[in-house]
Image: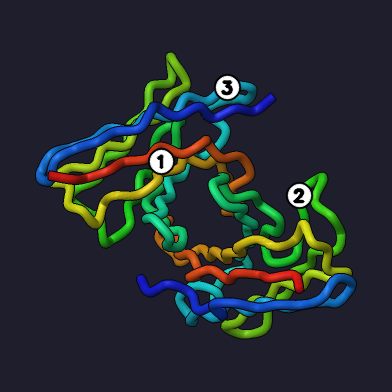
Amino acid sequence: QSALTQPASVSGSPGQSITISCTGTRSDVGNYNLVSWYQQNPGKAPKLIIFEVTKRPSGVSDRFSGTKSGYTASLTISGLQPEDEADYYCCSYAGGSTGVFGGGTKLTVL
Amino acid sequence: QVQLVQSGAEVKKPGASVMVSCKASGYSFTNYYMFWVRQAPGQGLEWVGVINPSGGIIMYAQKLEGRVTMTRDTSTSTVYMEVSSLTSEDSAVYYCARGDDTWGFDYWGQGTLVTVSS
């Protein structure tokens, strides 16, 4: 199972919006609406911020939103804040009770 | 409150085995899957496998098939992951994470560092 494809890095200024893409195949992202996104700060465990493509867990800011089109899922962060600087990972169900993560994207808030 | 508490760091020699435990509390243990995810130093997250504590589903990443075994003890609400025939490529922080049919992993353990070194 190959990792989903994410850009290695993205950046934006406070207040701006950024989008991180996550591209898979017909076997994972393209076939299931079971894409989740995680935020990870250095030395910490990941934190769930989006599940089932578009849903936010309780307590997650509505500045985070998710979409999917074809084989590509996307995470958008609006109103960028300094505390959003972190690594972001997508994950998709890949059938047969297996999953696959993206390679991760480092977000820098300028 | 939901908590996943993992066992402590391990140092192992190549070829050895390691077992990491993950003790759950604050929720009904058998109502959620437990996933395992690992992260090599400076690298991204890698899906390792999943176990259904109520029985049934146990699935491993193809890359680790044959070397990883996941078990659970419902009497102590603990899941275990054993990795055998360790190589340096298995050096990583191993996380357990709770999930369900949404495949969103909503609670994570603190991570267990496994170092494989001669």
Taking the spot 27% from the left edge, 32% from the top edge, the residue there is B19
Q: Secondary structure at mark 1?
A: strand
* Res B4 → quadrant: top right
Badge 3: chain ID:
B
- Quadrant where the image shows the N terminus of chain B: top right
Given the image, on which type of amino acid does mark 3 rest? Ser
The residue where tag 1 is placed is: B51
Count the labels in the image.
3
Is mark 3 in CB contact (under 8 Å) with mark 2? Answer: no
Residue B49 location in percent, x, y?
Answer: 38, 50
Location of residue A12 by image quarter: bottom right
Percent coordinates x, y for residue B100 in the rendering = 58, 45
Residue behind mark 2: A57
Q: Residue at x 67, y 76 (%)?
A: A20
User: Looking at the picture, how far across and down is residue A10, in whole percent?
Assistant: 66, 78
- Residue carrying label 3: B25
**SS category of the residue bearing label 3:** strand
